[in-house]
């Protein structure tokens, strides 16, 4: 395990580093921060701190902040870090709220970096300077948001806000350049596609999967309604229940609900139903999924959010479990539709341990499988599960950039903190792993 130490700047002689004495055996010749490396003269002391001369800090583009970071050693180089860049978009001109309404979320996220011994910042593609390998990052401190010019990071965590921005050609080229030319690990690089995810998991086993079919033609919908009677129609790139329809075949015809359109319609024929869907359905592809009967709490259906993260050893852990109870007349349990959150023990009482075991087994198994079969490095996943009257679990969705609305509830404060900190645990793992690769680019 790398050692975590307090780091201070000193006015001592030039190119001097004072390191804990245990590093004396490593014959250190150089020091690195992010992707920058410089030669140094190293001295040792008994203190669990690292002192860096001002000129070295300048050469490393090391910010003048009081920090506690990890020390890694490889090939006589002392690496300080990890330096973690969080890639996003939607910046404003205000340093009070640089990413508008998401500023509080990112402030909390960056605060968690300090707790885990990492240095972290947010940035956009235009903040990068490829001429000298630096990036102007937005850091968060007790005094608010500040900008610092730092080296390219050791690890990048992708938090682009939506799929449209993610497909921007300029951003795609930047992501490719940093990963391929600079060999910087980049995790959770894309939003999941519902159909790709279903197909991937279908190769594993089907016990947690609801029957699902790609909506290519009206006959696909007819087959699913004939087989199951009640279905969800979801956009494969959708989130938060947007664009979703709930359709049921009844003696009166076909009942169709849409939260987006604010409509509940009954169609006397299948042709009239498909005409309605053609008129209102978005141009993106959809899937059709069997609608299951959920367990209820106080007469309101509920499902589960299970959050998984990879730790400092790269292993998956369940970091949060919550019950999402649907709002009145809502077609999903999303909290913005009037839903609310409960803990497992609030609902299941003495059955809590058994239900938690089922959720944990499913989430960990599915996390490992998605990690192996989907493109890119994955470090966190948010799963939405449903449970029927027999306490059988079924997966609704897997999200690579899970929403955090459940963590607004004080009862989930510990899980909120843990899920944020675990992002940096995984960044530490990726840093260790990348240092083992000799092709990692150091400027």
Image (tube, rainbow, N blue to C red):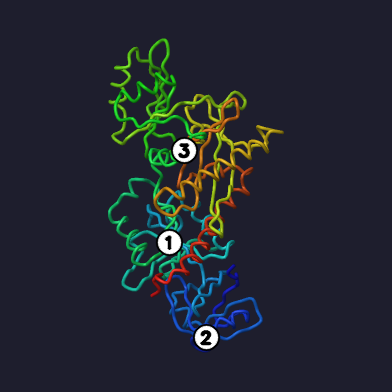
Residue in the picture at 38% in, 13% down: 253
Where 440 sits versus 214, above or below? below
Instruction: Tell which circle, 1 or 3, labels the residue nearer the N-terminal end.
Output: 1
Percent across and percent down for residue 262 are: 40, 25
How many dots with numbers? 3
Read off the residue under disc 2. 16
Q: CA distance from mark 3 to mark 2?
A: 53 Å
Q: Residues within 10 Å of mark 1 (few under 14, many from 20)?
A: many
Instruction: Tell which circle, 3 or 2, labels the residue nearer the N-terminal end.
Output: 2
Question: Residue 185 got which mark?
Answer: 1
Read off the residue under disc 3. 397
Of marks 2 and 1, the one in the foreground: 1
- Callout 1: SS: loop
Residue in the picture at 63% in, 83% down: 45
For the residue pair 153 and 214, the one nearer the viewer reads as 214
Question: Residue 111 got which mark?
Answer: none
Q: Residue furthest bottom?
A: 13
Asked if disc 3 and disc 2 are in contact, CB closer than 8 Å, the reply is no
Asked if disc 2 and disc 1 are in contact, CB closer than 8 Å, the reply is no
Where 241 sits versus 91, above or below? above
- Callout 2: SS: strand
Q: Residues within 10 Å of mark 3 (few under 14, many from 20)?
A: some
Give the quarter of the image for residue 154: bottom left
């Amino acid at each position: 395990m790398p050692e975590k130490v307090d780091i201070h700047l000193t006015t001592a002689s030039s190119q001097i580093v004072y390191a804990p004495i245990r590093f004396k055996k490593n014959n250190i010749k150089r020091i690195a921060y992010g992707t920058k490396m410089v030669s140094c003269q190293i001295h040792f002391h008994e203190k669990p701190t690292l002192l860096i001369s001002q000129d070295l800090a300048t050469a490393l583009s090391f910010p003048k902040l009081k920090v506690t970071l990890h020390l890694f050693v490889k090939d006589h180089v002392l690496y300080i870090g990890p330096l973690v860049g969080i890639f996003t978009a939607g910046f404003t001109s205000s340093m009070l709220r640089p990413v508008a309404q998401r500023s509080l979320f990112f402030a909390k996220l960056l605060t968690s970096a300090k707790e885990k011994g990492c240095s972290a910042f947010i940035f956009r593609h235009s903040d990068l300077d490829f001429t000298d390998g630096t990036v102007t990052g937005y850091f968060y401190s007790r005094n608010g948001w500040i900008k610092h010019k730092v080296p390219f990071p050791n690890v990048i965590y992708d938090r682009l806000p939506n799929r449209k921005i993610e497909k921007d050609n300029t951003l795609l080229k930047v992501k490719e350049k940093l990963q391929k030319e600079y060999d910087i690990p980049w995790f959770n690089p894309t939003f999941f596609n519902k159909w790709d995810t279903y197909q991937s998991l279908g190769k594993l086993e089907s016990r947690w999967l609801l029957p699902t079919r790609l909506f290519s033609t009206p006959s696909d919908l007819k087959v699913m309604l004939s087989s199951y009677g009640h279905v969800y129609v979801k956009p494969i790139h959708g989130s938060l229940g947007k664009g979703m329809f709930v359709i049921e075949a009844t003696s009166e015809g076909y009942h169709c609900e849409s939260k987006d359109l604010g409509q509940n319609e009954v169609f006397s024929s299948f042709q009239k139903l498909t005409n309605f869907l053609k008129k209102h359905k978005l141009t993106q592809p959809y899937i059709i999924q069997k609608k299951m009967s959920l367990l209820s709490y106080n007469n309101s259906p509920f499902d589960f959010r299970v959050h998984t993260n990879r730790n400092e050893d790269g292993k998956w852990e369940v970091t949060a479990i919550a019950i999402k109870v649907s709002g009145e007349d809502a077609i999903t349990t999303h909290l913005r539709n009037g839903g609310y959150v409960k803990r497992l023990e609030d609902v299941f009482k003495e059955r809590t341990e058994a239900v938690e075991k089922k959720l944990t087994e499913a989430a960990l198994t599915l996390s490992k499988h998605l990690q192996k079969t989907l493109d890119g490095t994955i470090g966190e996943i948010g799963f939405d599960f449903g449970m029927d009257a027999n306490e059988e679990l079924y997966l609704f969705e897997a999200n690579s950039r899970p929403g955090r609305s459940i963590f607004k509830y004080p009862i989930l404060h510990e899980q909120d903190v843990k899920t944020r900190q675990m992002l940096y645990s995984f960044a530490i793992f990726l840093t260790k792993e990348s240092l083992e690769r000799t092709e990692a680019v150091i400027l």
